[in-house]
Image: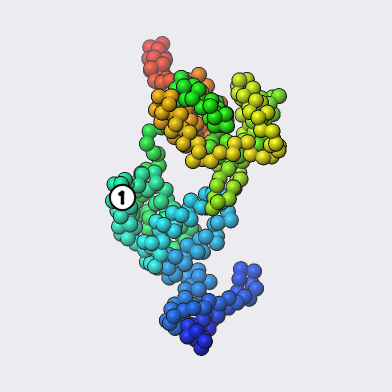
Amino acid sequence: MAVYKEEKTGTWRVIYRYTDWTGEKKQTQKRGFQTKREAQAWEREQLRKATSDLDMTFKSFVEQYTADMQTRIKENTWATKEHIIRSKLLPYFGKLKMCNITAQQIITWQNDLLNYKDEKGKSYSPVYLKTVHNQLSAIFNHAVKFYNLRENPCKKAGSMGKKKNREMLFWTKEEYLKFAEVMMDKPQFYYAFEMLYWCGIREGELLALTPADFDLKKGMVSINKSYQRLNGQDVITTPKTEKSNRVITMPQFLIEEIHDYLKQLYDIGENDRMFLVTKSGLHREMDRGAKEAGVKRIRIHDIRHSHVSHLIDMGFSATAIADRVGHESIDITYNYAHLFPSKQTEMADKLNMERRA
C-alpha cells in the first residue's frame, strides 16, 4: 500500500494492492481523505480485513459478513437483515474493535433498546427486540466460526425480547363470512381473501400466484414462489421454506370462484400475476371490511391462523394440516397445542383402568 498527497486537490489518496482468494494480484484505491492520518487509518483497516485480523472495527467486519452471506440469503430476507444492521447495530458498535466488544457493552445496548420510546410513547415489540439481538449474535457467531473470534459476547450478555409475539388472533368461520360479504363489492380483494382464508396461504404466496399455478380440472393450486416489493421493484423468490413448496386441493366452491375470477382478467398471460394489489391495499381493505362487518380487526397473517384453527375444529391431525399450510407438523403441534382437543382425561382414565386390571 502507499499513501500520496494529491497536489491539485490537497487531499490524500491510498493505493491498495492485494491478492484475492484465487491468488490473483489486484489493485484498488480510495481518494479524498482530508488528512494523512485518515488515509493511513483506512489503509490499516484494509490490511486487517485482508488478513481477517479481528482488531478491525465492527463496521469493517460487517462488510466482510455481507460479502460472505448476502448471496446465500433471499433478497427480501437480506433486506430485513441489512436494515437492522444499518439502523440498530452500526450506530452503537460500528467504531468498536471486534475483538474488544464486551458483554457489558452489549447489555448497555440492550438496555437502550428496551427503554426506547417513539414520539407516541410506543416501545419496540418483544419479538422485534429478539430479532435485533439475534442478528447481532449471528454476526459474532460468524466471526467465531470462520474468523477465529474467541467467543460470542452475546452469549454472556444473554438475550432480550421473546420469540413469540402477542397471542394469535383468529376469525371463526362465521366472522370470516361476515367479512367476505362486505368484500364482494371489490372482486379482486374478495377473491384474494377467499384464497387466504380457505387455503391458508401466506400473503407473499397469494401475491405471486399466476394462472399457470392452477389446475382447475383437478381443483389444485401449486405454491412455489413468493412476491415481495423491494426498493421499488417487484421481486419473486422461492417460498419461505422448503416445506412451503406444496400443492393445495381447493374446495369446489373456491374452484368455481377462481374460474369466474380468471374469466374477468381478459388479457392476463399464463405467467402474469393474478392479484395486482399491494400489501398496503390488502391491509386497508382489512380495516374497512372488519369495521363494516362488525368483526374484530386481525392481521393479514392471522387469516392463516384462522384457517389452521378451522381445520383443527374439523378434527384434522397436525400432520395433515402441516402438509396443507407448508409447516412442519411439530410446529403445528407446538404453536396450536391449546386448540387441539385435550386427551389428558382420556389418558388418565386408560392408565387408571390399566393399573386396576
Foreground: 127 or 118?
118
Residue 137 point in image, percent of width and height: 42, 54
Q: Which residue is mark 1?
A: 119
Residue 95 point in image, percent of width and height: 39, 68
Element at label 1: loop
Image quadrant containing the N terminus = bottom right
Q: Residues within 10 Å of mark 1 (few under 14, many from 20)?
A: few
Residue under the point 55% across and 51% down: 232
Instruction: Please say whether residue 51 is visible from this viewpoint.
Output: no
Residue 200 point in image, percent of width and height: 53, 30
Residue under the point 46% across and 22% down: 178
* Direction from residue 17 to residue 60 in the image, left or right: left
Q: In the rendered image of this protein, does residue 113 appear above or below residue 125?
A: below
Q: Quadrant of residue 38?
A: bottom left
Residue under the point 49% across and 78% down: 32
Q: Callout 1, which amino acid? A: Glu
Q: In the rendered image of this protein, does residue 91 appear above or below residue 332?
A: below
